[in-house]
Amino acid sequence: MKTHLYLLLLAAGISAAPQMSSMAELLTLLQQMCESVTKDMQTLRIETPDNIDDVNCVSTIFEGTEQLKTNPAMKKFSVFFQKFERLKQSLTPSLAKEGKCDTERKNATLFIEKLMMFIRKASKRARL
């Protein structure tokens, strides 16, 4: 499974190589988002992959990001969601054969932390 995720992210990274600075921007925006999560948002539960390295969980990450996007408290991070949409488009064509993903409903902060790990791994693989 890790090999499949590596190849998926490598392919996305090759096509997104000019956008490496946007990966850094995504991480910066996510860090700000994580720090600004209010108590009201802590009640928000998002399906979060148990294993961020599992290739079967990429669409779960995208669905969780959409759930964050629709939360009114996240409107000030619209730039993040626009930039993430571009990354999503580069990964989506490779997801046709996605299987089962083990998830757990976690609070918004934990989901955002997993999303940061996902983006870091995608950017590291893209640089290789």
Image (cartoon, grey):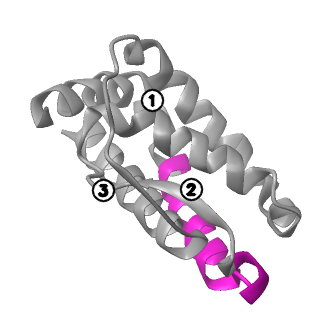
Q: Which residue is mark 1?
A: 16
Q: What span is colored magenta in the figure?
A: 22-41
Q: Residue 22 location, x and y as percent?
A: 55, 48
Residue 28 is marked as: none
Query: Residue at left 64%, top 76%?
Result: 32
Q: Secondary structure at mark 3?
A: loop
Quote the CA–CA distance across marks 2 and 3: 22 Å
- Nearest the viewer among 9 and 60 is 60
Q: Secondary structure of the magenta portion, mostly?
A: helix
Give the total number of marks visible in the rendering.
Answer: 3
Q: Residue 109 location, x and y as percent?
A: 55, 75
| Nearest-to-viewer mark from 3 and 1 | 3
Query: Residue at left 56%, top 56%?
Result: 26
Q: Is residue 39 left or right of residue 23?
A: right
In the rendered view, tell whether residue 39 sits above or below residue 9: below
In the picture, the quarter occupied by the N terminus is: top left
Quote the CA–CA distance across marks 3 and 1: 26 Å
Q: Secondary structure at mark 2?
A: helix
Few, some or many residues within 10 Å of mark 2 (<14, 14–19, 20+)? many
**Nearest to N terminus: mark 3 or mark 1:** 1
What's under tag 2, amino acid-wise? Answer: Leu
Q: Secondary structure at mark 1?
A: helix
Q: Residue 55 location, x and y as percent?
A: 28, 33
Q: Which residue is mark 2?
A: 26
Q: Which residue is mark 3?
A: 50
Query: Residue at left 40%, top 18%?
Result: 95
What's under tag 1, amino acid-wise? Answer: Ala
Few, some or many residues within 10 Å of mark 1 (<14, 14–19, 20+)? many
Circle 3/circle 1 CB separation < 8 Å: no
In the picture, the quarter occupied by the C terminus is: top left
Residue 61 sits inside the magenta stretch: no
